[in-house]
Amino acid sequence: MPLRDSARSPCVSSNFLCSWRCRPKLTFTEETLGLKQNAYRKSDRTKKFTSRVDHILKNRSGVGVKSLKIAIDDHLNVDTCHFNSWLQNFITPGIEEVILFPPSTKNKPDYNFPCSLLFDGRGNSIRYLYLNDCAFRPLVGFNCLRSLTKLRLNHVLVTGEELECLISRSFGLEQLELCSCMEIICLKIPFWLDRLSSLTVSSCDKLQVIESRAPNLSTIELYIDPVQLLLGESSRVKNLDLEFIREVNCVSYAINKLPSIVPHLEILTLHSGRERVNTPMVANKFLHLKYLDISLADDDVDETAFGAYDYLSLVSFLDASPVLDTFILSVDQLSMHHDSVTGDDASYLRQIPEHKHDRLKKVQINGFRSAKSMVELTCHILENSSALENLTLDSIFSQLEDADDIVRCSGRKTGECFSKSREMIVEAHKALKVIERYILERVPSTVKLNIRRPCIRCHVTDV
């Protein structure tokens, strides 16, 4: 039953009144309060939002609330006094989940969350806290989130020191997510947070250092520019997802820096929007890496300012990962500036001898190109991976794993494939010819080859 109807029901049902007053989950959004888009003027929508929450508050005390979500859209001019009054009534001892999108002006986090709301045992039962667009200023000695297991801060003004005060006594913390927290320069995670297993940091532009002593931190997701990662000799990070926001050469950085920073890594996912140097050969090894997923794109305006990327150089990564089982390469919207393989190149395909990948079983290349270096990479894998079982070559990357190999649009509710430029469609058909001419004859009988072709309905070309 929608929240608005639930609030009205006590007026006609004494039995439901008792149930409503004990409702454990409250969600206050324009949708749940029945404020249809464009049905009211801005001022009227604000008044109705405020009056309906106030009306619900009169019919329902905060006692028994387990989950509270209040999301105030930017166009609503809700007074912070109203917002604080609602929190004062609904954040009570026993509450477990709090999700807040407070009033804001022009997308600026000008709301200062009153930490006093979490005093007197009010915050000690909270397990999940999500704050958006506000300032949070806990002081030294802050000890109000003892049961916290998941903390998510989005566009929150909080310094590294304040964040350390916030989490220092949250001994059960398991997940920490920080997005666009622009005041954090150094993120320190103490060793006594021994239940912390997952850390996600994105778009924290001033961040320079991440220092974690949490002994069981196993998954890290970083969508930021390069920072100093200090994880300690006892680091047990096994899963790392890395993407640079503005800097280039994420793949090159990873193979040069990560083996010594995360020596126990088993799963590595890399997203590179601008890879300007080829992957170098290195002496360090990823001794435990089993799964490698590399996504390459090119979002540079001047896509001809740099030379074509040498896909064969990715052999360096395979060579540095002696127990690698799965390798996935995705090339999405990459510049068409590359040297296509031609009939005369058959006897001049480069080879890298004495580089065996005996554990590699599954290889998938999404967005396979007619680039000579990509053909060389594929041939190298086929000729030097004795345990290879499955090779998938997707000529036009659709980002749908379950799409049909032929009529790809059947995998979407709209009945159409993702839009692709004519240049990309032409390239996909060229790639198919390259596969037939240079790849097929090199595939051993023990390897299952899966060629994913352009959609016969949406990706047709007359070239």
Image (spheres, grey):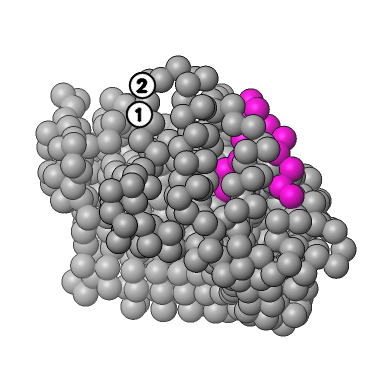
- Depth check: 218 or 62 in front? 62
Quarter of the rendering containing residue 317: bottom right
Residue placed under numbered mark 1 in the picture: 36
Q: Position of residue 7 (x, y in %)?
A: 38, 47
Q: Position of residue 307 (x, y in %)?
A: 56, 35
Q: Is residue 157 above or below residue 335?
A: below
Amino acid type shown at disc 1: Lys
- Depth check: 122 or 128 in front? 122
Please report the residue visible at 55 percent of the width from the left and 53 percent of the height from the top.
99
Could you say which disc has been placed on residue 438 in the image?
A: none
- Depth check: 79 or 247 in front? 79
Q: Of helix, strand and loop, which mostly describes the magenta segment?
A: loop
For the residue carrying disc 1, how many other residues have a C-alpha within 10 Å: few (<14), some (14-19), or many (20+)? few
Please report the residue visible at 68 percent of the width from the left and 73 percent of the height from the top.
146
Residue range of the region highlighted in magenta in the rendering: 100-114
From this viewpoint, which residue is outermost toward the top?
Answer: 41
Number of callouts? 2
Amino acid type shown at disc 2: Ala
For the residue carrying disc 2, how many other residues have a C-alpha within 10 Å: few (<14), some (14-19), or many (20+)? few
Query: Would residue 38 be seen by someone viewing this image from the given angle?
Result: yes
Callout 1: SS: loop
- Depth check: 369 or 286 in front? 286
Residue placed under numbered mark 2 in the picture: 39
Whether label 2 touches label 1, CB < 8 Å? yes
Q: Is residue 316 above or below residue 223?
A: below
Tell whether position 204 is magenta.
no
Q: Position of residue 421 (x, y in %)?
A: 32, 27
73 left or right of 396 in image: right
Please report the residue visible at 18 percent of the width from the left and 42 percent of the height from the top.
413
Q: Position of residue 308 (x, y in %)?
A: 51, 38
Please report the residue visible at 18 percent of the width from the left and 71 percent of the height from the top.
445
